[in-house]
Image (cartoon, grey):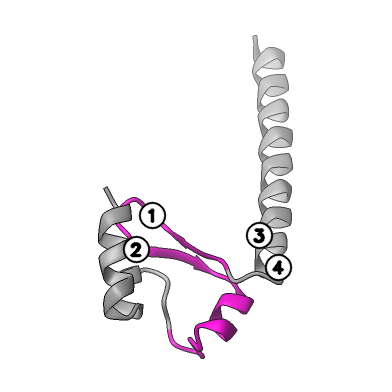
Amino acid sequence: MAISCLSGLSNLHQTLKKKRMQNQEYHQILQFSNHGIVATDENGLITFVNKRAKEILQFGRKKFVGTPIWKHMPKTGKLVADCLIL
């Protein structure tokens, strides 16, 4: 029984390590994309802004993660955001 548990833990450790590496790869792809990428959660709060989006939107060094997307949009953008967030 103890050997089985250790084997299961080892497999779990390997799976988590693989997932962590995949997440890092995805993050790098998104971060260095030539396209501006802004991700939000279901409530419209910004969860990710890549370098290109910061340049395009002139975000500078301000903190945007955790803030509402519509806070950083012109009035027409706010109307669109309200329609998209259900």
- Which residue bears the numbered disc 4? 33
Per the rendered image, the range of residues in magenta is: 37-62
Marks 2/1: CA distance?
6 Å
The residue type indicated by label 2 comes to: Leu
Badge 2 vs badge 1, beta-carbon distance below 8 Å: yes
**Quadrant of the rendered structure where residue 56 is?**
bottom right
Q: Was residue 28 drawn as part of the magenta stretch in this picture?
A: no
Marks 1/4: CA distance?
20 Å
User: Where in the figure is residue 51, as x and y percent of width and height?
Assistant: 62, 78
Q: Disc number at residue 45?
A: 2
Crowding near the residue tagged with mark 3, few <14, some 14–19, many ≥20 C-alpha atoms within 10 Å: some
User: Where in the figure is residue 16, as x and y percent of width and height?
Assistant: 66, 39
The residue type indicated by label 3 comes to: His
- Which residue bears the numbered disc 1? 41
Crowding near the residue tagged with mark 2, few <14, some 14–19, many ≥20 C-alpha atoms within 10 Å: some
Marks 2/4: CA distance?
21 Å
Would you place residue 59 above or below residue 46 in this image?
A: below
In the image: residue 77, left or right of residue 2: left
